[in-house]
Every structure is written in C-alpha cells, then in structure tokens.
Image (cartoon, rainbow, N blue to C red):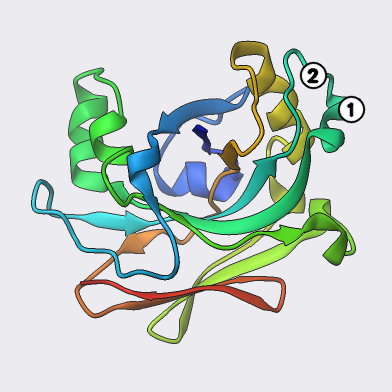
C-alpha cells in the first residue's frame, strides 16, 4: 500500500504558510514506515527543532483504478478516516529554500498518524464534513471538506493519472489553517464531525 498526501488544499492554510495557491493538487508521498496507528504516542525526533501538527481527512481506496474520471471517483473509496501529517517545519523551510525534495521533513518514521476508518455512508455528506483538532483540550484547527480547493473526487481522479490506485492505499486530503508546534506531553484529539477518531500523546 502507499500513502499519497495533498498539500496546500485549503486556501487559509496556504496563506498562513505564505505559499503559492496551486492550480492543481500538490502531491507528495509517505512510506509505510511513516504510519502510526492505534493512538500510540508520537515521539519527537531529534533531527529538527520544530514539528507541526496538520489534521487531515483521509480516504481509503477500495478498488484498483487508473485514469479515473472525476464523476466516477466516488466508486473507488468507501471509508473515511482522520490523520495527522506531522511536519518538521524548520527542516521543510530549509529544504524549500534550497529547492530540495520534502521527504526528510514529511515522510519520516511516525509522521503519518492514521485513525480507524468509518464507512462513508455513516456521514450525511462527505463533501460537507466538519472536522477539528484539539491540543490539550483547546481547539487548534477547524476544517470542513467543502472548503477544499480540490474535492476528494478531484484528488482521486488527478492522482490516478500518475499512480495506479490500489486497494488499501490511503490519501491525506490536506489540512486547514491553524497548524502549530507540538511539545512533549501535549495531548492531541481529532474529530470527524462529532466522532472522536484520534486521542494520543506527544512524547
């Protein structure tokens, strides 16, 4: 399985990072060694000084697909989850300034926190789905899939032009504004609508 991630998919987040607003989905990937499941704690690595949380809606691919059209994309996923894309922000800024790839700051071990998945039919409309992240009981990020620059179906269709999507692949669909630094002993709780999907500690 593979993990595909979409960057700059919420306008306010692109603005808060002073990033250019894209005219097509920005795609990067993470290896399976990045996966952190079961609400296990995230241990802050030593190779950077500033790690940020980025809460995101996830989809899980349910059918093999290539060159999928947008109007048929909804047939290729049937479950929704929540995740955290941890980012070594200071390292990312250095890499970007040198025109280098992002893998070191985005794809390191444990950087892809993944919840359990829920059938998409349990939500009235996954294209108008609120989600949020609390840190130590305080709301830090609030998002809604209706505010995506590129919808879930557009993301699936676009990604399938370049990568054959296979059963079990996971797509991180982008983070809203409000990203911030994590600290040891922080508690992160993530929600899809009113469903608590994540609850874990930073070590």
Q: In this view, does 110 lie to the left or right of 66?
A: left
Q: Residue 91 appears in which quarter of the rendering?
A: top left
62, above or below 52, in the image = above
Q: Give the residue furthest to the bottom.
A: 137
Figure check: 33 above or below 24: below
Q: Which residue in the rendered view is the most extreme toward the left?
A: 46
Return the x and y of residue 87 as percentages of the image width and height: 32, 47
Q: How crowded is mark 1: few (under 14 residues within 10 Å), some or many (20 or more)?
A: few
Residue 62: mark in rendering: none
Residue 138 location in percent, x, y? 45, 83
Name the side, left or right, on which 101 lies relative to 141: left
Of residues 2 and 107, the one nearer the viewer is 2
* Residue at horizontal 19 percent and vertical 45 percent from the top: 90
Count up the numbered dots: 2
Q: Quadrant of the C terminus?
A: bottom left
The residue depicted at 73 percent of the width and 39 percent of the height is: 152
Q: Name the residue under label 1.
A: 72
Q: Quadrant of residue 107?
A: top left
Q: Mark 2–mark 1 contact, CB under 8 Å?
A: yes
Asked whether, in this view, residue 201 is left or right of residue 169, the answer is: left
Placement of 69 over or under 21, stated as above or below: above
Q: What element carries label 2?
A: loop
Q: Is mark 1 on a helix, strand or loop?
A: helix
What residue is drawn where x is 9% and y is 46%? 47
Whether residue 123 is visible here, answered yes or no, is: no
Which mark is drawn over residue 68? 2
Residue sitting nearer the eye, 126 or 21: 126
Crowd around label 2: few <14 · some 14–19 · many ≥20 (10 Å): many
Label 2 – label 1 distance at C-alpha: 7 Å
Observer able to see residue 158 = yes
Q: Position of residue 144 (x, y in %)?
A: 70, 59
């Amino acid at each position: 399985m593979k993990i595909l991630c979409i960057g700059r998919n919420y306008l306010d987040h692109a603005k808060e990072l002073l990033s250019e607003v894209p005219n097509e989905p920005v795609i990067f990937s993470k290896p399976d060694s990045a996966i952190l499941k079961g609400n296990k704690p995230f241990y802050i690595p030593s190779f950077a000084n500033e790690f940020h949380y980025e809460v995101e809606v996830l989809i899980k691919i349910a059918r093999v697909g290539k060159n999928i059209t947008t109007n048929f994309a909804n047939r290729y996923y049937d479950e929704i989850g929540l995740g955290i894309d941890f980012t070594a922000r200071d390292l990312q800024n250095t890499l970007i300034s040198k025109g280098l790839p992002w893998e070191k700051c985005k794809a390191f071990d444990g950087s892809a926190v993944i919840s359990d998945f829920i059938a998409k039919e349990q939500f009235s409309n996954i294209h108008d789905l609120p989600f949020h992240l609390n840190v130590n009981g305080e709301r830090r990020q609030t998002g809604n899939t209706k505010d995506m620059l590129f919808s879930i179906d557009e993301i699936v269709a676009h990604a399938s032009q370049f990568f054959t999507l296979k059963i079990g692949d996971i797509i991180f669909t982008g983070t809203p504004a409000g990203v911030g630094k994590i600290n040891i002993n922080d508690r992160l709780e993530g929600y899809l609508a009113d469903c608590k999907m994540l609850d874990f500690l930073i070590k």
